[in-house]
Each structure stands twice: as structure tokens, then as C-alpha cells.
Amino acid sequence: MFGKILIANRGEIALRVICACKELGIPTVAVYSEADRYSLHVRFADEAVCIGPARSSESYLNVAAIISAAEITGAEAIHPGYGFLAENPKFAEVCETCKLAFIGPSPEAIRLMGDKNMARKRMAELGLPILPGTGVLASEEETLEAAKEIGYPVMVKAAAGGGGKGMRIISAPEELPKLLQMAQSEAEAAFGSSDVYLEKYISSPRHIEFQVMADEHGKVIHLGERECTIQRRHQKVLEESPSTQLDADTRQEIGGKVICALREVGYTNAGTVEFLMDENHKLYFLEMNARIQVEHPVTEMVTGLDLVKMQIQVAAGLPLPVEGDTVGLHGHSIECRICAEDPNTFTPSAGKITGFHVPGGTGVRVDTAAYAESIIPPYYDSLIAKLVVHGEDRAEAVQRMSRALEMFIIEGISTSIPMQEKILADPDFRAGRFDTQFLNRFSQNGVGG
């Protein structure tokens, strides 16, 4: 096992990794920007190193500063969390070159899955169903011809992208030139590449993903699926496990295909394989995230496994502590992403938290690095807490989440809690009748504010 681990991240995920390390008896090193000097991950790590100013490009994305912090503190491994450098193959390669274990997939796997078009092609070769689409497109003329062949509506997507950036829905040929240019410009700004491809657009899909874990001895397992359909602008708002749309046979079929595909490409560590489900309940491979996900706690709640500990153990060369290639799912779990933003306009809300109380009780978990009198800086993602519940079934989990949201107090800034409360109270949500357009209709009906 590692003698010391540096966490190349901030906020709740940095604190989550520190907790796992403490339970494994591993000392930790926190890195922080000047804006995060008084953050909890700095307080609870065994050591902390300031790596630069508030701007992430000068701190949390500063590879040289992070590697230097690892070397001067004697860290043997780096956990990247999610976001920032978590899916940067060059960073993983630098870690290897500097004899630092990267707690995540190999640079080759990150590179393969980071290119969405290449990943689609490879997964199709390995037996996963994919939507009709194209490779990287060279010109507007080629894009028009491809869209005509696929059939409108289509979606243009950034080949190097994710998180909803570099994506546009095109409903007719006359819309294509302008929307194509917008997607390319956004992709270039976000990912440093303007490469895009087309994919058939499903207007009202469900978004379902499979959590996987693989060790360095050839063992790959899946830990069931998560329903991530409630989204705003392709950003997940609420997740749950298991999905009400998958029966045991479908779970076994798709999970088996995922395992075979990842074993074939030599994947290791944690990852998530994402699918879209159409109105006929058919699943299509969307993309793979080669890292731990924000929503990993819902899988932990229904499996009883600690995914971050497993990541660390796998990176240290240990075999997965699970028999077979699947695990049983027990009960139902829901996660609400609590963000520092106005619930009506979704404008980020930075500032000081003047009052703070987290809910408790049976089956309630809160992952957060916020506290009373802490400052939410304006420089980073607005996620400040993850409220997670577990129940014997979905009905109990929904009721428990409603109760927990009511008892979650955050004062001094605006948060998404009012919106989450209204989602949980909605009859269609409670009945499981929703798709990725749910929140759009929700807001249009005057319920989102």
C-alpha cells in the first residue's frame, strides 16, 4: 500500500479521498489555491501545499506545481478526483514518468475514452450498441451530407468533450451552418480542439450509466446502473440507483457486454459507461468517463462498497475484493447535487455561508466541504454538497430525500435546494415518468422557481 497520497483536487471530492485514506491508514497531502486556504480538505489532510493563485489554470491545473508538491512531501501516488486533471492523459503520463502512481486508468485508456468519436468506434467493434453517427467531420458540406443521411434531428458533439460543452441540436439543414460553428467554437475554447461529429438525436431519452471497476489482474466488474436522467443543459441534477427502467435481464445483458469490452481494451480502475435509452427501452452507448464520478455515492449506498478505497487498492496492485463480476443491489438510493446558485436563474452564488446545518438520521449521507462561516469562491464549480439517501425501496428513498432537503439549512448564499424540493414533490418524478427534457418542462410550467 502507498506510504502517502497527494489529492490533486479541492472541495468535497478532496475531502472524500482524505476520508478513504484515513480509513486505510495512509497519510495525505492536500494542495490548495490561495482562495482555498481555509478549506476543510486543507485542514484535515496531514500536510498541505499552496500551489498558486485562485485561478484554476494557475493552481489546480498547474501540473508542474502539483508534481513539485508531491516530490517535496514524499507522496507516492496522486488521486485526481473528478474534473480538473482527472481525465488528462498527459498528466497521467507525467505521474508515471516521475514515478508517481496515478490513481485512475492508464494514460492510454484515458486517451481512448477522452476521444468520444474514437471511443464510439471502439465500443461498437466490441459489441456495444451505438446510435447512428459519423466520425470527425472535415467541412460544413460533409456535415450537411452526413446529417441528411442520418436524418434530422441530429446532434453535433465535441470529439474531445463532455459535460454538455460543444453540443448543439440541429433540427433542419438551414440551422446547421450557424450551430455547427457555435459548437466548434465552444469545443475549441473548452477542450482545445474544434473536432466535432454527428450523432442521431433522441428527443426524449433516459440517461443510464453503468459503474465499473477493474484491477490490474484482468478482473472487471460492474456495480449496477445509475439513473441520471434529471438534467439541466446536459448537467446532472439528481441521480439514483437502480433505474426503474432496467429489469434484471437487461442489467445482466448490458453489464456483461460492458465487462467484455473493457476487459478487451485492458481498462483498469474506476470508470462509468454511459448510455441513452430510447422510447423503446433500447440502450445506446454514449461515452465513458475514465474516472470516479460525482454520483458514485449512490452506488456505494446500494452495494455497501467504498469505491474510493477500491480505487486506491487497485492502483496499489491489489486484486478486487469482490467475487464474480457483478454485485447485488440492495434498496434504493438518490443523490441531489446541492449547488451554490440561484434556483430560478441558475446564476452562481458566491459568498460567505452564515448558517449551516446538515440533515441526519437513518439512511442519510452528506458529502461536503462547506461549513458555517466558510467562503464559497466564485472561481470554481458551483457544487458545494451532495445529499444522498438510502431506502428499502424507491418510495422510501424519495420520502427520505424530501425530509432531508427540508432539514438542510444553508444561509448567506442561494442554493439549488428549493428546486430539488420541487422535483421530489412532483407527481411525475415520484411515479418515475420523466426523461432528459423533464426539467425544461418543469421550469416552463412555473415550478422551477
Image (cartoon, rainbow, N blue to C red):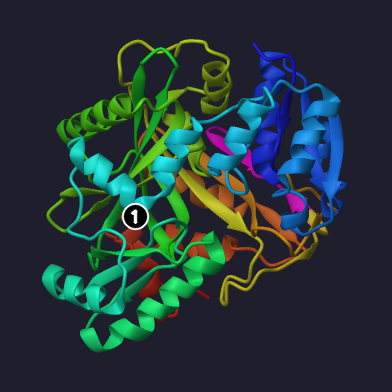
In the image, what residue occupies the spot 40% across and 50% down? 115
Q: Position of residue 128 (x, y in %)?
A: 20, 40
In the image, 352 versus 167, the foreground residue is: 167
Residue 157: x, y in percent? 36, 64
Q: Nearer the viewer, residue 50 or 119?
A: 119
Query: Is residue 256 shown left or right of residue 221?
Result: left
Quadrant in the picture for the N terminus: top right
Q: Is residue 312 above or below residue 199?
A: above
SS for callout 1: helix
415 over 15 or under it: above or below = below
Q: Is residue 68 magenta?
A: no
Which corner quadrant of the image does residue 90 belong to?
Answer: top right
**Would you place residue 356 above or below residue 133 in this image?**
above
Give the residues drawn in magenta, as a range. Answer: 356-368
Q: Is residue 323 left or right of residue 85?
A: left
Q: Quarter of the image holding residue 69?
A: top right
Q: In this view of the protein, which residue sits in the foreground, 13 or 68?
A: 68
Residue placed at 22% from the left, 64% from the top? 202
Kindly identify the residue that appears in the image at 49 percent across and 31 percent down.
105
| Tally of numbered discs | 1
| Residue bearing mark 1 | 430
